[in-house]
Image: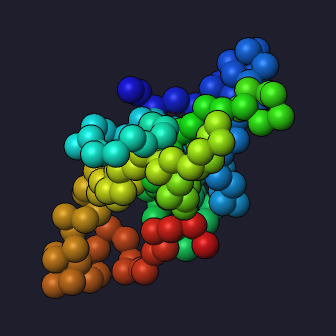
Amino acid sequence: MEAGRPESFAASLGKLEVTFDFPKVGLPLRHVEIAPPFPPAIEPQAGIPMVLGYDTKDARLYPPEGLFVDGTAVYGRVSGQPRFSILAGKSDVWLNGRTYPLASHHNAAGDHLKFRAKRFAASGFSAMIRPLLASRKPQIYLLDPY
């Protein structure tokens, strides 16, 4: 699935009277996409693995390519109202009176960052040997929400 803009996705859900919840990390949510296929689990799981991309252009602690977070999309009803939620940092969810493990692909966010930062990652050795010619100054980045 192609990455989608969260605003247009939320607006289309709103037309169906479905609320949209996603992890708030203090950065603008840039895109949401389904994670690449992962081997199926043995036991039943709830949801669809997702990758959330946050815009980090104004956040110096994160890679300029963006902050990517693994999540799981779940549809349910809260007090009778339909709700589409993307959950991050959880391992299970309560649905219809039962707890289910969330479907997950824990490498998807890291793989997404690795793909986005391919040119920068390839410059690591040459930047170490010739630091004055590096495309960016060396820095430690946070890869998870702070």
Relative to residue 112, is residue 39 drawn left or right? Answer: left
Q: Position of residue 124 (x, y in %)?
A: 22, 74
Would residue 69 be found to the left or right of residue 108 on screen? right
17 w.r.t. 101: above or below: above
Residue at the location (80% across, 28% down)?
81
Vertical comparison of 133 with 65: above or below: below
In this view, which residue lies farthest toward the front?
97
In front of the other: 102 or 12 = 102
Front residue of this view, candidates 59 and 94: 94
x and y, in percent, of residue 68 in the image: 46, 55
Picture quarter with the C terminus: bottom right
Residue at the top extreme?
15
Name the residue: 77% across, 36% down: 78
Q: Position of residue 58 (x, y in %)?
A: 63, 61
Pinpoint residue 67: horizontal percent, then vertical percent.
Answer: 50, 58
Residue at 54% across / 39% down in the picture? 73
